Amino acid sequence: MGMSVGQGGAGGRRGGRRRGRRNAAISEINVTPFVDVMLVLLIIFMVAAPLLTVGVPVNLPQTQANAMNADTQPITVSIDQQGRIFIQETETAIEEVVPKLQAIAKTGYEERIFIRGDRTSNYGIVMQVMARISAAGFSNMGLVTLQEQDS
């Protein structure tokens, strides 16, 4: 009842298998770096997303109106502080507002149009733009404002 201590025994075979596996490829996937990268990308997109929605810089007035439920992306007409008119982010002359809206409108005259007027812009220009759009047959217009902050 002796025990073999040399290379030929059971202990020697296990040792030989370990040496052979050292050079083999590791077939396990380490998900920790993947999760780290995904969390960093999530944070980057959360910070960058609000910056992508801003088109023409307009200082909107504040009101107590409730937020509108927007199912589709509306057409946005903006009037900045200097009275320049923008459709989406393209500067447009007041005479070209209606033809461009008609070209952009996908669903016809029921297309939702948001009008963003700077709080310091001329009230008359905002009303001229709204009157032209209304006279062209667009009836689904809304003025965009910020919700009032309780101070």
Image (tube, rainbow, N blue to C red):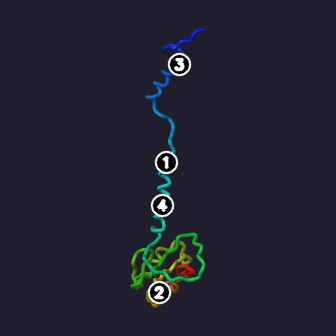
Q: What element carries label 2?
A: helix
| Disc number for residue 126 | 2
Say which residue label 4 marks. Answer: 45
* Structural distance between the alpha carbons of marks 2 and 3: 89 Å
C-alpha gap between disc 3 and disc 4? 55 Å
Q: Residue furthest bottom?
A: 124
Task: Quote the CA–CA distance across marks 1 and 4.
Answer: 17 Å
Residue for point 46% across, 83% down: 118
Label 2 vs label 3, nearer the camera: 3
Camera-side residue: 90 or 133? 90
Label 3 residue SS:
helix
Q: Which of 15 and 134 is in front in this view?
A: 15
Q: Residue 34 shows which numbered tag?
A: 1
Residue with the mark numbered 3: 11
For label 3, the crowd category at 10 Å Cα-Cα, with few meaning under 14, some 14 to 19 and many 20 or more, is few
In-front residue for pair 123/141:
123
Badge 3 vs badge 4, beta-carbon distance below 8 Å: no
